[in-house]
Amino acid sequence: MRANVAVGSFATEPLNLWADRCPLLSESDQNDRCSDCPLSARSELLQVCRSHTTFKPSVSSLDIIITIGIVTIMTIRKAIVSANRLSRIVADPAPPPYRRVPAYLIRRLQMISTALMAETFEDEDLPVSQWAVLTIIDNHPEIDQSHLAGLVSIDKTNTGRLVDQLEAKGLVERRPNGSDRRVWMLCCTPLGQKTRKRLLPRALAVQERLLSCLKPAHRELFIDLMSQVVVANEKYIRPGAGRRKPKSR
């Protein structure tokens, strides 16, 4: 007698009647374990063999059946994984090229940082620009207004207005320069220093929140790389650069 044994969509050649027991079904096979093939595939094939107890294939034919079964299952699984990956690619297309442009990213990051600071200080009578000026003055006592404008990256006219506002709040004071009466030196008042000390933890928490998406080691690396780029291009820092110049009449 001869019979066909099918696995999935594949079928073997007619198999010869051979013995009472499949030669490959050892004691370990009874527990559906095999070191040469996946458990799921082996289990399916053993069911096929046991359902044809009257017709036993030769050793070489059974090896062919197992090989075909394993290839079939692996092919189906690979197709499923490929389909899932393709669906993710279609659902999440690549970002447009401009989102990899440094100028675009730097501008966006600056806007995000400013928004977070404004949110943190919304209950204080201290806009972000005034906080920036107060920070520089506190770190550089007796700085002149021209130098201050360069460090805070704001044009001299607007820097002067911010200093006036801080002075009106009692946070900053102007002191005459002994060597040049045309120059005024800027210092924080005791109230200004007290305000800086009180708000500094909140300002630092904003920076932590801004970089919270990065691992600690990556945060340090990110700051180091930004500093390297800034230092290498500081000669281009001109407060007010990029603004449209008024048309001459």
Image: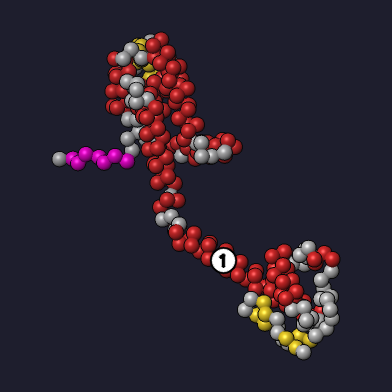
Prevailing secondary structure of the magenta residues: loop
Residue 172, quarter of the rendered image: top left
Q: What are the residue bounds of the magenta stretch? A: 242-248
* Quadrant of res 22: bottom right
The residue positioned 28% from the left and 27% from the top of the image is 157
Q: How is the image coloured?
A: secondary structure
> Looking at the image, is 155 positioned above or below residue 65?
above
Q: Which element carries disc 1, helix, strand or loop?
A: helix
The residue sitting at the left extreme is: 249
Query: Which percent across, then down, holds residue 87?
Result: 48, 62
Q: Around disc 1, counting alpha carbons within 10 Å, would you say few (fewer than 14), some (14 to 19), or many (20 or more)? A: few
Can the viewer see residue 111?
Answer: yes
- Does 178 sit left or right of 215 as displayed? left
Q: Hey, what amino acid is under mark 1?
A: Ile
Q: In this view of the protein, which residue sits in the foreground, 61 or 117?
A: 61
Residue depicted at x 42% and y 23%? 136
